[in-house]
Image (cartoon, grey):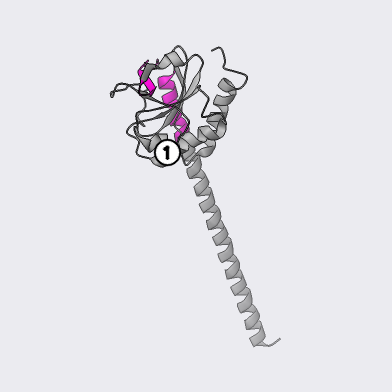
Amino acid sequence: MNKKTIYTLIAVCVLSIIGLQIFVLSQSSAAEKRAQTYLEAIKMQGEILYRDFKYSMINAGNLMENNRVYTDPNASFFLFDSINAPALMICVPESNQCSSCIDNAVNSVRDFFPDFSRNNRIILFSQISGSRLSSRVSRKHIYRCVSDSCNLGIINSEEQKPFYVVVHPDRRMSMFFIPDVLMPDLTKQYLNMIKEKYFIDGPPKH
C-alpha cells in the first residue's frame, strides 16, 4: 500500500471521526434542548398547580356573596335561589380582554359536559355585556349581577383570567381553578375530578 493510499485512508478516518463527533454533539444538543423544554414545562405546570392550590386554600370555606342576578333583563333573583346542589361556576371577569382565554375556559367545560347548554348546575357568570360572550355560548344562560359593582367575594389576584369554582347551596366555595391555554391536560384532570365527584350518579350530599 503506497503512501498516498495510506494518507487517503487516514484522512477518511479522521473525517469520519469528526463527522461522528459532530453527529453525537448535535444529538446531545437536541437532547439537551428537549430536556430543557421538558423541565420548563414541568416548572410551568408546578407554578400553575401552586397558584391554584393557594387560591383554593384561601377561598375554601369562604361564602360567596348572594348577589341579585339575572339571565333575563326583565327578571332578577338572588343567585343562591337557583343553586340547590353543588354547581360548577365559570367566572369571566369584566376586565378580561383575552378572547382565547374565554374560548378555552368555556370550550373545555363544553367538551367535558355534552349537556353544557341545558345543565343548570354549570353556571356561566360574567359582567361582560353585549355579544362578546353571548355569541360564544348560544343557548346557555349567562348570569349577570343587577348591580354594576358586583362582588362575588372570591379572593383572586389573577382577576383578568376566567376561572372555575365549585359553589355549594350553603354559599361555600371550593375547588378553585384557573384554566390555562398552555396546559390543557391540567384542565382536563380538574374537570374530570369535578365530574366524578359532583356530576356522576347525581350530586353528593356534601
**Residue receiving disc 1:** 101
User: Residue placed at 60% from the left, 78% from the top?
Assistant: 11
Q: Quadrant of the N terminus?
A: bottom right
Q: Is residue 203 left or right of residue 145?
A: right
Above or below residue 129? Residue 2 is below
Q: Which quadrant would residue 128 be assigned to in this image?
A: top left
Q: Is residue 185 left or right of residue 65?
A: right
Residue 46 image offset from top left, x and y in percent? 48, 35
Q: Which residues are magenta?
A: 47-74
Residue 200 in view of the camera: yes
User: Residue placed at 57% from the left, 25% from the top?
Assistant: 195
Q: In this view of the protein, which residue sits in the foreground, 109 or 55?
A: 109
Q: Which quadrant would residue 176 be assigned to in this image?
A: top left
**Please, what is the three-letter code of the amino acid marked with disc 1?**
Cys
Query: Dot 1: what SS?
Result: helix
Say whether residue 193 is magenta: no
Say whether residue 57 is magenta: yes
- The residue positioned farthest toward the front in the image shown: 74
Q: Is residue 133 left or right of residue 112?
A: left
Q: In this view of the protein, which residue sits in the foreground, 163 or 11?
A: 163
Above or below residue 43? Residue 37 is below
Above or below residue 134? Residue 205 is above
Q: In this view of the protein, which residue sits in the foreground, 53 or 169?
A: 169
User: Residue placed at 42% from the left, 37% from the top?
Assistant: 135
User: Residue placed at 68% from the left, 88% from the top?
Assistant: 2
Residue 172 in view of the camera: no
